[in-house]
Amino acid sequence: MAKNELNSLEVKELLRYFVNNNKKLAKAGKTPIAIEIEGMPGTAKTSVAKQLSQEMQDHYVRLNLSEIEVCDLVGLPTYEYEVINKAKEVKWVTDKVLAAFITMGWEASGNNRTAYAKPSWIQGKEDKPVLLVLDDYNRV
């Protein structure tokens, strides 16, 4: 496998290209891609990503994978129930609000599914893109 060695400015420009491309993919309803930046400790990998997110005015989130559980990354599982109103509108609601929907005239269809609640690190950051850095993955 070929390896490329880049300085921090080159890494930032390459990362900028991928972030902009991922924004276009997401806007088109396609799955963004992840990239891996590898290097010796202290070579500014994380700092470059943080600096770029600030320049692009995006949210920056760093998760140290050696210190978290899987549910911290993907969210906790939650059960959702399908409800239907008289106009045949369908919604999926959690058990926390199911009774309120039934009180408002919605009917439970009997269908349910498991979904994942938004992890805490994404809550409140839905207004703009998030540059997510998964640090120390090699220690997991």
Image (cartoon, grey):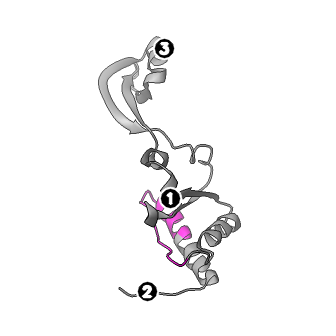
Q: Which residue sits at x=60%, y=83%?
A: 10
The CA distance from mark 3 to mark 1 is 35 Å
Judge whether 69 appears above or below 139 on screen.
Answer: above
Mark positioned earlier in the residue sequence (2 or 1):
2
Quarter of the N terminus within the rendering: bottom left
Q: Which of the numbered marks, if any, corresponds to residue 27?
A: 1
- Lateral position of residue 55 relative to residue 110, left or right: right
Question: Which secondary structure, mark 3?
Answer: loop
Percent coordinates x, y for residue 98 in the rendering: 44, 20
The three-letter amino acid code for the residue at tag 1 is: Lys
Label 2: which residue?
3
Percent coordinates x, y for residue 84 in the rendering: 38, 23
Judge whether 64 appears above or below 42 on screen.
Answer: above
Percent coordinates x, y for residue 9 in the rendering: 64, 82
Percent coordinates x, y for residue 49 in the rendering: 61, 69
Bounds of the magenta span?
19-40
Label 3: which residue?
104
